[in-house]
Amino acid sequence: MTEDPSTIMTLVKTVGALALVVGFILTLSWVAKKYLRASLLSVQQGGEIKILQSFHFEPKKKLMVVSVNDQKLLLGVSESSISLITHLEKGPSEAQEIRHAHHA
């Protein structure tokens, strides 16, 4: 049973298009997970806990500055634990710093 060359080409084009679409979806998913997740979480959180900053320094390990009930905390976060590193001192907010810069 021999295949028509046009049928084989159609099959190759279909499989290639499917591979491109699946690759695009996987890439988009990776980008969203890597770069958008933390910013979306910080925007969605309207409660007392807010993620202020996050710094990845190894795979699955990061430092995070969070605000809890108006206290800033520096946390070490790994795959299996979260550790309090230190309480951060309250400094002037960015808005106060900007106001002082404009008045000077």
Image: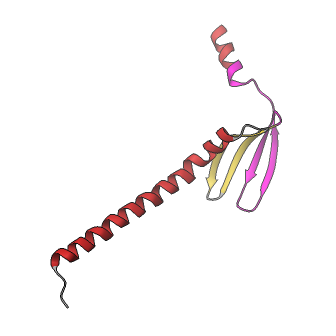
Identify the colour scheme used.
secondary structure
Quarter of the image with the C terminus is top right
Residue 19 appearing in the image: yes
* Residue 90 image point, x, y percent: 80, 29
Towards the viewer: 63 or 9: 9
**Image: magenta residue range:** 69-96
- Residue 96 appears at what percent x and percent y? 71, 19
Would you say residue 104 is visible in this rendering? no
* Res. 78 image quadrant: bottom right
In the displayed orientation, state which residue is furthest to the top. Answer: 103
> Is residue 15 left or right of 64 when viewed as pictured?
left
> Residue placed at 78% from the left, 54% from the top?
82
Q: Nearer the viewer, residue 44 or 96?
A: 44
> For this view, does 93 lie left or right of residue 3?
right
Residue 70 on the magenta span: yes
In the rendered image, the vertical position of residue 64 relative to residue 4, given as above or below: above
Identify whether 92 is placed above or below 31: above
Residue furthest bottom as drawn? 1
Residue plotted at (65% across, 58% down): 60
Q: Position of residue 14 (x, y in %)?
A: 30, 68
